Each structure stands twice: as structure tokens, then as C-alpha cells.
Image (tube, rainbow, N blue to C red):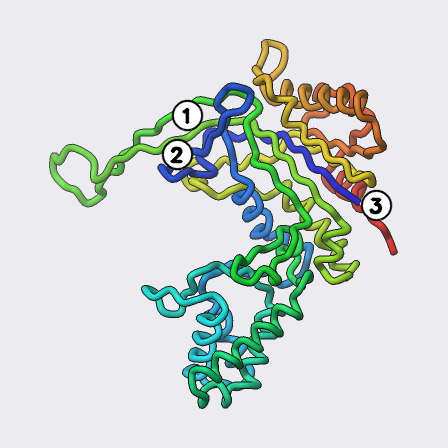
Amino acid sequence: MFIELHFIQNFAPSNLNRDESGNPKECDFGGVRRARISSQCIKRSIRTSPIFTKYTSAELGYRTRWITQYLLDPLQQKGLQFEDANELAMLFANAFLGEDKKNPGRTTMVIYMSIEEVDIVAQQLADNKDAILSADDKDVKDILARIIKDLVKKSKDRTSAPDIALFGRMLASEPKFNLDASCQVAHAISTHRISMDMDFFTAADDLEGGDAAGAAMMGVTGFNSACFYRYMRLDTRQLLMNLDGDKEMTHKTVEAFLRSSITAVPTGKQTSFAAQNPPSFLLAVVRQDGMSWSLANAFEKPVFPTRANSLVENSIAAADKHWGRLMKAYGGEPVPVVLTLDENAPLESLSDARVNSVDEWVNAILDKLPQE
């Protein structure tokens, strides 16, 4: 089964996802400049959301270059002294990922591992502690190679971490450790043309006395305000495979993904802008046929507000009309479920698919999941 998510989400002035210059990310689409939030930013917002953890009730994975720190606690829990645990962690990290020469204990590559996988390594290191700490370099290399091979074998095409099962992982130096993602996430783009604004800010020195003039500091930051179209697609069969056939965890992960996709908002510059704006339009599509329809081309011609309708309303109307065109041209048997913040939002093609609350929206999707 496949689940597609299509959101319209309008943000107040903000800088949610910055480029290398510190300004909001942008792109060209339909011949005009659009605001953009990267898929990587969206995925991180989802998997680090408290809602995701609440509904999976599971330990999430860690993406880190400090695997040495990740290993220290389980090694010490297995009875190793700190010095031995630290040395074993350093030796493993260097053998598996290579050591950053400028930062001892930090690896040259990022690794994405579950708690279960870390425990596999910790147990193997603890079992082989004496052999590793007393052997010469060649023998140590051979022992660590066997431990790495065992980790890769036990982790091949499976994980216990729901976030890794969703978003996958890639390790160029050890391709067998890779895991195909069950979820595709598009870059969010504005439904309309965008222009960036600049905020000139100053800060006063509270302890500056007398008649001192001027600011203690000053600077400039970029921001914009945009109505975004967001698109994601989940392959529940791949998710089940990634979770090693655990149907209960698959069900929990699907619900956690649905709910956290709604509530997760990027954290960039939020202390300065507080753009905490939930989606105005939620469309979920359940499919059995494997087809996939992004509605991005509904906005290939930029949307504009009119006297009669807001930018959000016209964006929803554009998505609705594009859905109708796709259904007429390609058909199939997709099952849509729609929730709008405004019960009077303009819908024609999707009017019969409306529900009244997030819970009803989520449950309508979960009811379509295979029960066996």
C-alpha cells in the first residue's frame, strides 16, 4: 500500500531553512523564484518531533560522527571500565568509519545507527575485549573486521529504529549497511512567486551609561513569507520489510509519521520569527496500484490572491482542480481523505473526501492498512 501526503501550509514572515549565506532557501519553478524548504530539513523536523517519539514508543536512531560517545554507555553497562570502553570504541570507530585526525574520537563519515545495532557492536567488543586490548595491530584489525562483518550481516535490510526504516541510510564505505528508504519527501516550494525581505536589527547595551549613542551590535537577516506545497509518499510494504516484518511497529510508525508530518515545523530562526503555522489543507491519498502523483504542477503557474479569495484559498483551489485533471486523464482507484482548516475552502474534485478533524483524517488512513 502507498500513502501520499499533500499539504498547503502558509507561514508568516520567517527564515525556516537557511542557505550557505544565512538567507531563506529558494529555487526556480515555473519560470519564477520560489521559497523552498529542503527535504532534509523536513525529514529532520519529522523524526525529531516529540509527536513521532510519542506514537512510536521506540528508541530512534542517531545520525552522528561521534559513534565513540554512542558506544561508551552500553560498553560500561556491560562491566567495562571507562578507559577500556573508550579505547575499544575508538578502535572500532576508526576501523569502521575512519578517524578524523583533527578530532580524536570523531569519525570521517556520518553513521546512522539504531540502539539495537549499537548494542550488537558493544556486546561483540565486550566479548573480545581481552583479545583486542592485548593483540598486535594486525590481529586487532582482523577481530574488528569480523565484528563489522557481523554487524552488517545482522543489520542487512532491516532496522529496529522507525526513523531509519522511514528515511533509510547510506554508507558509501559499506554498501551492504545501506537501507532503502520507505518514504520519499519532496522539497517544499511556495505556490507563488517570492521576493526576499531584509531585516536590519540592532541590540542596545543595557549597561552602557551616560549619553552614549549607537548600538552594541547590528546586523542584517533575510526572511520571507510563503505559502508552501509539501509532498511526501510512503511505501508501507517497504516500511514493513525495513522493520523486519514487525507489523505492530509498522502501524505505529505510520501513525507517528502522519501526525508528526502535520505538527513538525522547521526550527530555523524561530526565536526571532515564531512562525508556528499549521497546515491549512491536508490531503492523504491511499493507493494500491503504485502510481504516484505530485501536485506540484498545480502551481507551475504562480498563484495570486484575489479580491474574493486569499492566497491560501487559491492554492487549495489550484490543488483541487489539478487533482481533478489527473483523475480524468489517468483514472485509477486512489482513495483521498481531505481536511481543511477552513470548512468553506473551495473544493470541487475533492469535496466528497472531507473529514472534520486530524484524528478522523489519521484514522481514515490507518483503517486502510492491512490488518494481518
Q: Nearer the viewer, mark 2 or mark 3?
A: 2
In the rendered image, the residue lying farthest to the front is 138
Q: Which residue is mark 1?
A: 196
Is residue 372 shown above or below 301? below
Query: Does dot 2 land on a helix, a strand or a loop?
Result: loop
The kind of residue on which mark 1 rests is: Met
Residue located at (65% from left, 66% from top): 155
Q: Which residue is mark 3?
A: 367
Element at label 3: loop
Q: Are marks 1 and 2 in contact (CB under 8 Å)?
A: yes
Q: Residue at x 75, y 49 (%)?
A: 236
Q: Is residue 160 visible?
A: yes
x and y, in percent, of residue 333 in the image: 85, 32
- Which residue appears at 72% of the width and 60% of the height? 243
Separation of residues labelled 2 and 3 (CA atoms): 42 Å
Asked which quadrant contains residue 123, the reply is: bottom right
Residue 23 numbered tag: 2
* Foreground pick, 117 / 199: 117
